[in-house]
Image: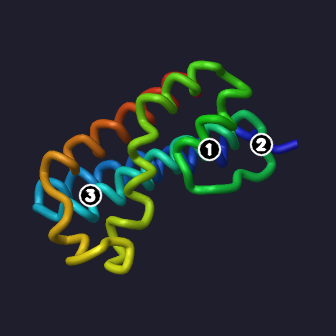
Amino acid sequence: MADPRKPGARWVSQAARDLDDAHYLRDGGRHNTACFMAHQAAVKALTGYLYAEGAEAVWGASVADLCEDAGVFDQGFFALKADTVFLDKYAKGTLQPDMLPGGIPADAFDGLESERAVGLARQVLDFVTERL
């Protein structure tokens, strides 16, 4: 049987790269895309954790749902969910103009929001990394 930590580590490595990209985008004033990439980093870190714990398949792209799934292995993920569920708001509205009542995502997100998103994604990545 293959070591489940290998695919998990690959997901977590990509999560770290996505978080670096979120920093880059935030620093460049691309706040909506920085928020999206922060969400992606958190989702990939959680997915990696679940694979490392032996999950055969991981479904979904919600920080809240993935934290619930990870809570089966470590109850600390329930507290992480409470702290980081805000990231789920960046799954679609950051990129798709039809998700906003008016304007475009590039105009709807600012530096405060991208800073918060990057910080929350860092929290998720650190939390996962400490457990692997």
Mark nearer the viewer, 2 or 3: 3
Amino acid identity at mark 1: Asp
Query: Which secondary structure lies at badge 2?
Result: loop
Q: Which residue is mark 1?
A: 65
Residue sticking out furthest to the right: 1
Amino acid identity at mark 3: Ala
Q: Is residue 53 left or right of residue 78?
A: right
Amino acid identity at mark 2: Ala
Q: Which residue is mark 3?
A: 34
Q: Which residue is mark 2?
A: 55
Query: Where is 97 relative to 48, above or below?
Result: below
Which label's residue is closer to the chain start, 1 or 2? 2
Residue 35 shows which numbered tag? none
Which label's residue is closer to the chain start, 3 or 1? 3
Rendered location of residue 28, percent (x, y)? 11, 61
Residue at mark 1 to residue at mark 2: CA–CA distance: 14 Å
Query: Which secondary structure lies at badge 3?
Result: helix
Residue at mark 2 to residue at mark 3: CA–CA distance: 29 Å
